[in-house]
Image: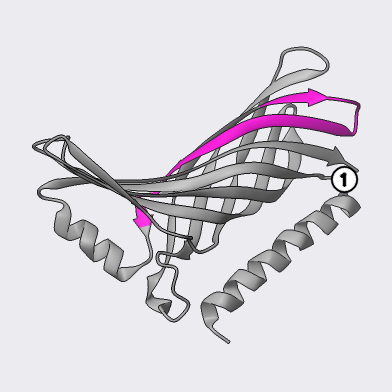
């Protein structure tokens, strides 16, 4: 079995393991549904009108677990996936812009771990602010035979949501996460970025917007 496929399966098993452990230990578990994606942009340092952008977005779902280790402060772990996305390539040169769209894009898996602080607005309502580390991994091309296109992009992330407490156990929320990914594991991508550094600026980030719910056992 391909080592990368095995690693993904292992992560999925760990995520479900966290959910079952939460039930036994009093942690909070939740689920999220929404839209997620990433953007990879190469911009000319001398003329920002000249750039290449590769973007993808699609249906996002995730499971997460929280543990409150101090008043209003929680540790959070999250595992999700972005599916049914369609990638687009946008080229801009001297003010002329053209976009090409692909038929589909491979599944991307998202892993996030961090800390979250709850700002209590009222007994039923709070705003959660979080900071952590985010990983977005998947193939850079929709080609099963191209194993070398697999990449794990990673870096710091910020998350925020508005949470309504229906009762002591059940909560619903809407929010989003933004991650900056300066680290890439794919050798071709890292070498390409290094080659561009003198004349171009490279930005790589991921994002998710979602509605979700949390249940405390």
Residue 180 drawn above or below residue 103: above
Dividing the picture into quadrants, the one containing residue 150 is bottom left
101 left or right of 23 in image: left
Can residue 164 be found in the magenta stretch? yes
Q: Name the residue located 58 percent from the left edge and 73 percent from the top edge.
A: 7
Task: Please report the residue visible at 80 percent of the width from the left and 55 percent of the height from the top.
Answer: 19
**Is residue 130 visible in the rendered structure shown here?**
no
Position of residue 47 measured from the top left corner of the image (x, y, whole percent):
11, 36
Report the quarter where the N terminus lies: bottom right
Q: Is residue 175 visible?
A: yes
Mark 1: few/some/many CA within 10 Å (<14, 14-19, 20+): few
Residue 194: image location, x then y, percent: 19, 58
Q: Position of residue 137 (x, y in %)?
A: 49, 61
User: 184 left or right of 129?
Assistant: left
Residue positioned most to the top = 122
Q: For the C terminus, which image quadrant?
A: top right
| Residue under numbered circle 1 | 26
Q: On screen, 82 above or below 169? A: below
How would you classify the magenta stretch by its main secondary structure?
Answer: strand
Q: Residue at x 10, y 50 (%)?
A: 198
Q: Quadrant of residue 24?
A: bottom right
Q: Which residue appears at 82% of the width and 18% of the height?
A: 124
Residue 53 drawn in magenta: no
Comparing 210 with 165, the one in front is 210
Q: What span is colored magenta in the figure?
A: 162-183
């Amino acid at each position: 079995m391909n080592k990368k496929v095995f690693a993904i399966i292992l992560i999925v098993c760990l995520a479900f393991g966290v959910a079952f452990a939460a039930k036994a230990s009093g942690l909070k578990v939740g689920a999220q549904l929404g839209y997620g994606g990433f953007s990879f942009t190469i911009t000319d340092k001398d003329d920002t009108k000249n750039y290449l952008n590769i973007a993808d977005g699609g249906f996002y779902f995730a499971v997460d677990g929280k543990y409150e280790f101090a008043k209003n402060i929680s540790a959070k772990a999250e595992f999700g996936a972005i599916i049914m996305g369609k990638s687009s390539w946008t080229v801009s040169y001297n003010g002329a812009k053209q976009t090409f769209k692909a038929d589909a894009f491979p599944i991307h898996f998202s892993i996030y771990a961090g800390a979250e602080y709850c700002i209590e607005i009222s007994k039923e309502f709070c705003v959660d602010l979080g900071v952590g580390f985010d990983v977005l991994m998947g193939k850079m091309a929709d080609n099963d035979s191209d194993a070398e296109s697999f990449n794990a992009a990673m870096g710091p992330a910020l998350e925020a949501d508005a949470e309504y407490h229906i009762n002591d156990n059940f909560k619903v929320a809407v929010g989003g996460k933004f991650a900056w990914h300066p680290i890439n594991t794919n050798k071709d991508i890292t070498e390409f970025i290094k080659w561009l550094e003198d004349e171009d600026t490279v930005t790589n980030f991921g994002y998710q917007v979602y509605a979700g719910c949390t249940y405390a056992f």
